[in-house]
Image: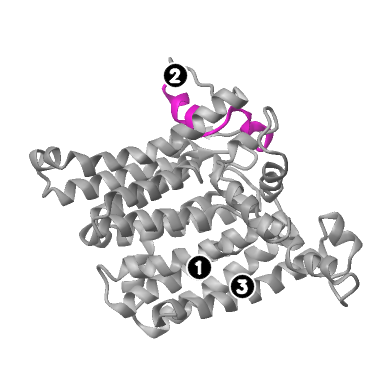
C-alpha cells in the first residue's frame, strides 16, 4: 500500500473504532431494534454471532437505513416511499450482503465504509493536481474530520456518492472523459444531486477545448460523455415510471419539474412535507423554527456557506468547475424545504457533498495550531452527532 493511502487509512481506522464505540454507547442508552432490546451490549453473550451483530451492526440501524434494508429485502414497492431512494447503493449493499453470508445490514455498512475510505484517497490525489502534497493531505484529513463526515461511517449513500463525484473530477482532469461520464452516471443512480455533476463536467470539457466552440465541436465524441450523467437518472426514471407508476409533475408548473423528476411523489411517506423552493423562503421558515434540530442544521449549514464565501475566489482561480459544483450543491441544499415543523432536515449532510470547499480550507489552515483546532473541533462535533444519530435524539440526518 502506498504511503499516500496509508496516511488516510490510519486516521480512518481510528475514527471507525471510536465512532463505533460512541454509537454503541448511544444504542445502549436508547436501544431501538429488537436485537438491541433483547441482547445487552456488555458483557458478551452467546451466541457470539448475535452479540457481535448487536454490538457492531444494530447501533447503525437508524433513520433512512430502515428504508434501505426494506429495498434490499423486498425491492421497491409503490406507495411505501422507497422510490425516493435511488437504487445503486441498495443494489451494491445487497450484493455485498450476500458475500457476507446474507447479512444485508453488514453489506450496506461495508459498502458505505469502503466507499468513504476510497473517496478520501481519491480526493487527496485530485487535490494534488493543484495543491502541494502537504496541502492535499490536509484537505483529505479535514474532510474526514468534518462534523458531518460521521455519515461516511454509517449505512448511508454519502460515501458512495462522494466516491463517484471525486472520480468524475479525477477522470476529467486526466482527460478520460468517458470514465468521467460513467462516474457521473453512477452518482445520478446513487443520489438526486448526481444530475448536477453535468455542470462541472461540461465546464471541464469547455476548458479542454480552449474555450473554443469550434474546437469543442471537432471533439464531439468526448463531449458526448456528459450525456452519461442524465442517462443514469433516465434509467431510474424509466424504472420508476414503468414498474412503480411513480413519475408525476405538472407540466404547467415549472417549479414541480425538478422535484417531480428527482424525487418520488411518494416521498411524503418518509417526510410529510417537502419540496424545492427559493432558498430565501426555506431560510425564512428555518429562522422562525424554535426546534433545536433546526438550530444545529443552520449552524452547520452556515459553516459551509462561510467556506464558500471566503474560499470561493480561491476555488474559482484553482478550478472554476470546483466552484460551480460547490455553488450548485449549496444552492440546492438550501432550497430543499422539509416543512415548517423542521424546515432543513438533512441540510448539513447535503452540504457535505460540496467537497471542493475543503481545498481552500486546507490552504488557509496551514498553520499547525489552526489545523489542530479544526481537527479537534471536527472530531468533537462528529462524535456528538454520532451519539445523536445512535440515540435518535435532537438531530435528524
Among numbered discs 1 and 3, the one appearing first in the sequence? 3
Magenta stretch, main secondary structure, is helix
The residue lying at 43 percent from left, 34 percent from top is: 278
Q: Disc 1 and disc 3: Cα gap in Å?
A: 10 Å
Indicate the position of residue 256 as horizontal and vertical percent values.
47, 25
Q: Disc 2 and disc 1: Cα gap in Å?
A: 42 Å
Q: Secondary structure at mark 1?
A: helix
With 339 as the anchor, is 168 left or right in this view? Answer: left
With 225 as the anchor, is 123 left or right in this view? Answer: right
Answer whether residue 50 is magenta in the image.
no
Q: Which residue is mark 1?
A: 117
Quarter of the rendering occupied by the N terminus:
bottom left
Q: Foreground: 314 or 297?
A: 314
Q: Which mark is residue 139?
A: none
Q: Secondary structure at mark 3?
A: helix
Q: Which residue is mark 3?
A: 16
Give the magenta part as a residue range. Answer: 253-271
The answer to whether any part of residue 14 appears in the image is: yes
Among numbered discs 2 and 1, the one appearing first in the sequence? 1
Give the farthest residue toward the top: 252
Q: Which residue is mark 2?
A: 253
Category of crowding for the residue at label 3, using alpha-carbon neighbours closer than 10 angstroms: few (below 14), some (14–19), many (at least 20): some
Amino acid at each position: 500500500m502506498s504511503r499516500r493511502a496509508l496516511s488516510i487509512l490510519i486516521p480512518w481506522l481510528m475514527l471507525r473504532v471510536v465512532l463505533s464505540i460512541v454509537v454503541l454507547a448511544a444504542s445502549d442508552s436508547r436501544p431501538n431494534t429488537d436485537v438491541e432490546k433483547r441482547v445487552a451490549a456488555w458483557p458478551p453473550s452467546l451466541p457470539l454471532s448475535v452479540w457481535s451483530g448487536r454490538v457492531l451492526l444494530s447501533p447503525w440501524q437508524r433513520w433512512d437505513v430502515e428504508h434501505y434494508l426494506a429495498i434490499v429485502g423486498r425491492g421497491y414497492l409503490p406507495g411505501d416511499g422507497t422510490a425516493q431512494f435511488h437504487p445503486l447503493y441498495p443494489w451494491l449493499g445487497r450484493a455485498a450482503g450476500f458475500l457476507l453470508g446474507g447479512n444485508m445490514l453488514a453489506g450496506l455498512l461495508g459498502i458505505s465504509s469502503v466507499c468513504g475510505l476510497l473517496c478520501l484517497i481519491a480526493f487527496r490525489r485530485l487535490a494534488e493536481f493543484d495543491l502541494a502534497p502537504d496541502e492535499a493531505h490536509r484537505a483529505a484529513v479535514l474532510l474526514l474530520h468534518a462534523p458531518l463526515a460521521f455519515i461516511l461511517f454509517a449505512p448511508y449513500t454519502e460515501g458512495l456518492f462522494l466516491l463517484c463525484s471525486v472520480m468524475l473530477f479525477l477522470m476529467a482532469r486526466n482527460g478520460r472523459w468517458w470514465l468521467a461520464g460513467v462516474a457521473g452516471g453512477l452518482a445520478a443512480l446513487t443520489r438526486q444531486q448526481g444530475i448536477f455533476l453535468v455542470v462541472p463536467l461540461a465546464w471541464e470539457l469547455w476548458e479542454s477545448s480552449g474555450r473554443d466552440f469550434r474546437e469543442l465541436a471537432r471533439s464531439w465524441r468526448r463531449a458526448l460523455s456528459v450525456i452519461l450523467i442524465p442517462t443514469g437518472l433516465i434509467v431510474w426514471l424509466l424504472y420508476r415510471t414503468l414498474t412503480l407508476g411513480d413519475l408525476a409533475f405538472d407540466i404547467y408548473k415549472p417549479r414541480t419539474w425538478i422535484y417531480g423528476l428527482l424525487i418520488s411523489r411518494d416521498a411524503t411517506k418518509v417526510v410529510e412535507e417537502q419540496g424545492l423552493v427559493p432558498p430565501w423562503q426555506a431560510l425564512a421558515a428555518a429562522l422562525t423554527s424554535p426546534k433545536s434540530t433546526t438550530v444545529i442544521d443552520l449552524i452547520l449549514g452556515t459553516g459551509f456557506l462561510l467556506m464558500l464565501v471566503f474560499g470561493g475566489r480561491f476555488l474559482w482561480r484553482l478550478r472554476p468547475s470546483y466552484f460551480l459544483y460547490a455553488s450548485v450543491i449549496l444552492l440546492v441544499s438550501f432550497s430543499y424545504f422539509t416543512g415548517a415543523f423542521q424546515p432543513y432536515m438533512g441540510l448539513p449532510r447535503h452540504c457535505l457533498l460540496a467537497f471542493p470547499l475543503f481545498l481552500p480550507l486546507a490552504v488557509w489552515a496551514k498553520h499547525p495550531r489552526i489545523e489542530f483546532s479544526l481537527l479537534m473541533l471536527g472530531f468533537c462535533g462528529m462524535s456528538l452527532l454520532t451519539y445523536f444519530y445512535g440515540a435518535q435524539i435532537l438531530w435528524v440526518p
